[in-house]
Image (cartoon, rainbow, N blue to C red):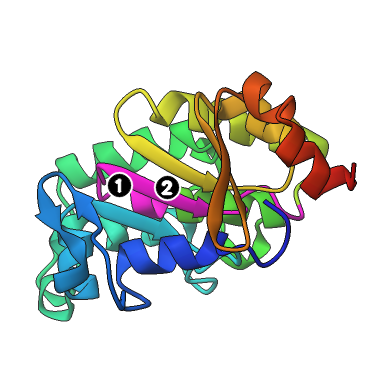
Amino acid sequence: GPNGPGKTTVLDLICGKTRATGGSIQFDGRELTKMKEFDIVRAGVGRKFQNPSIYENLTVFENLEISFPRGRNVFGALMFKRDQEVIDKVHEIAELIFLKDDLNKQAALLSHGQKQWLEIGMLLIQDPELLMLDEPVAGMSVAERKQTAELLNKITKNRSVIVIEHDMQFVADIANRVTVLHQGKVLSEGSMDKVQNDPKVKEVYLGH
C-alpha cells in the first residue's frame, strides 16, 4: 500500500509492540492480544524492523551464535557453551543468507544489504513459525534484491512469512498472496495478477 495505510501498525499489533484496543489476533490457536511481547516471540513469531538491528562490534558468527535460542536470556548467554550443534546451525544459516564466507567479519564492515540478511539470519536461527519483514529490500542494490527474493522463496517452504514492501516487482518475485491496504482497511487481496488489475488499486496508486 501507499504511505500511511497501517502496514507497519499491523506488524506492531501482531508482535505486541502496539496493544490492540479491540478485535482479535490469533496465531496457531493462541490469542496474541493478551500476550506480552517476549511470550509472542516464544510462541514462534519473529519480527524484523525497517533498519537492521545487529551487533556491529561482533562478527557475523557471534551475531548468529547469540541469537541461538539457548542464549536468549542473560543467564543463558553467560552459561552458553559453544557446542557442535550451535556451530553447525550457524554455518547452515550463514550459507542460507549468503554470508558463509564472512563469518569472521565484523558486522560493521558488511554492506547495507548484508546487514539486512544477517538480521534475517538472526531471526531464522530461532526457527520462528511466522517471520515478519518490514521493507527488507529498502536501500539494496538490484543484485541484492534478487538474492533476497531467492532467500525468501527458500525460507517460505518451512514457515509463514509476511513482507511489507513498496517494490511491486520484488513482491511479484516472492508473494503467493498479496494484500493492499488503504486508510487502515483491506483494499484488495489475492494473487499479484488480480491485485495489479484491480480498478480500486489502480485508482489509489495511479489516480485513475
**Residue count near mark 1 (Cα–Cα under 10 Å), binned few <14, some 14–19, many ≥20:** many
Choose between 147 and 33: the one closer to the eye: 33
Amino acid, disc 2: Gly
State whether residue 44 is above or below residue 50.
Answer: above
Q: Is residue 27 left or right of residue 10?
A: left
Choose between 41 and 168: the one closer to the eye: 168
Q: Quadrant of residue 130?
A: top left
Callouts 1 and 2 close, C-beta under 8 Å: yes
- The percent coordinates of residue 96 (x first, y second) are 45, 32
Residue behind mark 1: 125
Q: Residue at x 75, y 48 (%)?
A: 140
Query: Does residue 125 show up magenta in the picture?
Result: yes
Amino acid, disc 1: Ile
- The percent coordinates of residue 135 (x first, y second) are 62, 53
- The percent coordinates of residue 114 (x first, y second) are 62, 49
Q: Secondary structure at mark 2?
A: helix
Residue 35 in view (yes/no): no
| Residue range of the region highlighted in magenta in the rendering | 122-139
Residue 202 in view (yes/no): yes
Q: CA distance from mark 1 to mark 2?
A: 6 Å
Q: Secondary structure at mark 1?
A: loop
Residue behind mark 2: 121
Q: Quadrant of residue 51?
A: bottom right
